[in-house]
Image: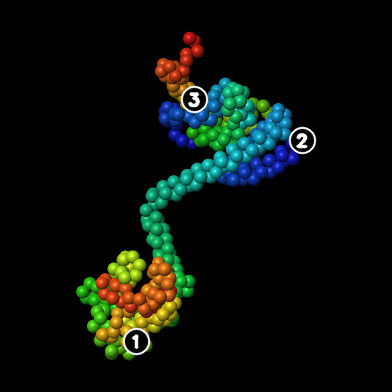
Amino acid sequence: MTTQSDPANLLPLPPVAFHILVSLADSDRHGYSIMQEVAARTGGDVRLHAGTLYATLKRLLSDGLIRELDERPDASSDTRRRYYGLTSYGRDAAEAEARRLAELVRQARASGLLLDPSR
Amino acid sequence: MSGRRPQAAGGVVFRLLVSLYPAGFRDEFGDQMMLCVQQQMNEAHRTRGLPGVVMFWLTALMDVGTVSIKERLSMWWQDARFSIRTLWRSPAFTCVVVATLALGIGASTTIFSVINCILLKPMPFRDADRIAMVYLNGADRGFPRMYLSLADYLDWRTHDRAFSDAAAFGTFGRFFTWSGRGEPEQVSGTYATAGFFSLLGVQPLHGRVFERGDDQPGRIRTAVISERLWHRLGASPDILGSVVKLNGDPHTIIGVVPGALRFP
């Protein structure tokens, strides 16, 4: 695991990594649940496959942004399932990325590229 | 149940692709990946039927295939960085390793060069292993190998008892201005004594090569051209006997030798 530095040093987060962190922000999940949540949240625009998902999970684990849970929230589920949760460092990194993206959207609106939906 | 065969076949292929991942990755995530794929496949079959299953497998297999290659490359890069750091921290060990590799590579290269010259690509001359190049030893003047002058060659030829035959030729890399047949151009070549071709055992394709007496004073200047040049001049048989100028001096072409001839 790498030494945890300022989360801002991790920006910009790869899109897949950000989607996974957002998915874990409100609940601990296993891999397939993350896939389902991301697909549902994006209306099917982002569909994660197993290769990409687990390669990204490996990096997030290595960077300390997520952790594997020792206890299974659902003891009756398939034993092959492993659950992941967001670390505080991962939450900070996700928040930093969200603020970065929000700033980009604000700039796009300010330049007239994006119409302000409130107007 | 429709779609079972594509599912089964896809499952087998998916397992094979997962085996492409590094062992550590497989051990940690392999089971989870198979479980996810199984659930996604069931979902695809439930919502979109057989076409959905087929489409799912195509995209899933492509995803796993490309990511597995990236993981392999990433692992190799990490291993390379670790190796370099380890070598950097142990300079003495690194020097021994590098020296050993250098000796081994040097010895292998030397041995192969000898084998290549003697066995694999020997010189295309008769009794090539009995041909020797003779130089003057000028080591005391800083020139371990010095070319003989023509006078030295003639003197040495008169008194030599060690060799059965001898011939001399000028240093290669010389260029002559060719004119009188075809377009004027620069051609590469050299001067040689009369016994040059017979010593090497080179047989002409057309005409003849130099013979004893051709290099005596008063004889007409003769030239033997390569097959490659002969083709450039139109490959005409009447080339023999024609007179061309080399650096302004008339020479009679008496023969054509094989185009692939490599001089010693």
Q: Nearer the viewer, residue B35 or A117?
A: A117
Chain hosting mark 1: B
Q: Amino acid at mark 3?
A: Ala
Q: Nearer the viewer, mark 3 or mark 2?
A: 2
- Compared to residue B27, the image places residue B169 above or below, namely below
Mark 1, residue position: B212
Q: Residue at position x 51%, y 29% from top? A: A15
* Left or right: residue B117 compared with residue A36: left
Image position of B247 (left or right of B56): left
Q: Tell me, for residue A94, which label it has, or none.
A: 3
- The reply to whether residue B57 is visible in this rendering is yes
Q: Residue at x 32, y 87 (%)?
A: B213
Q: Is the residue B116 above or below the residue B8 in the image?
A: below
Q: Is residue A69 visible?
A: no
Marks 1 and 2, how far apart at CA: 92 Å
- Estimate the x, y position of residue B182 in percent, counting from the top left: 35, 67
Q: Is residue B1 above or below residue A22?
A: below
Say yes or no: labels 3 and 2 on the same chain: no
On the image, which quarter does residue B138 sit in? Answer: bottom left
Mark 1 crowd level (few <14, some 14–19, many ≥20, 10 Å Cα): few
Are marks 1 and 2 in one subunit?
yes
Q: What residue is shown with label 2?
A: B2
Q: Sequence order check: which comes first, mark 1 or mark 2?
A: 2
Name the residue type under label 2.
Ser
Give me the chain letter of mark 3. A
Q: Position of residue A103 (x, y in %)?
A: 43, 20
- Residue occupying image coordinates x 43% and y 64%: B104
Whether tag 1 and tag 2 are in contact, CB under 8 A, the answer is no
Task: Classify the position of the C terminus of chain B by image quarter.
Answer: bottom left
Tag 2 secondary structure: loop
Mark-to-mark CA distance, 1 and 3: 93 Å
Left or right relative to A98: residue B60: right
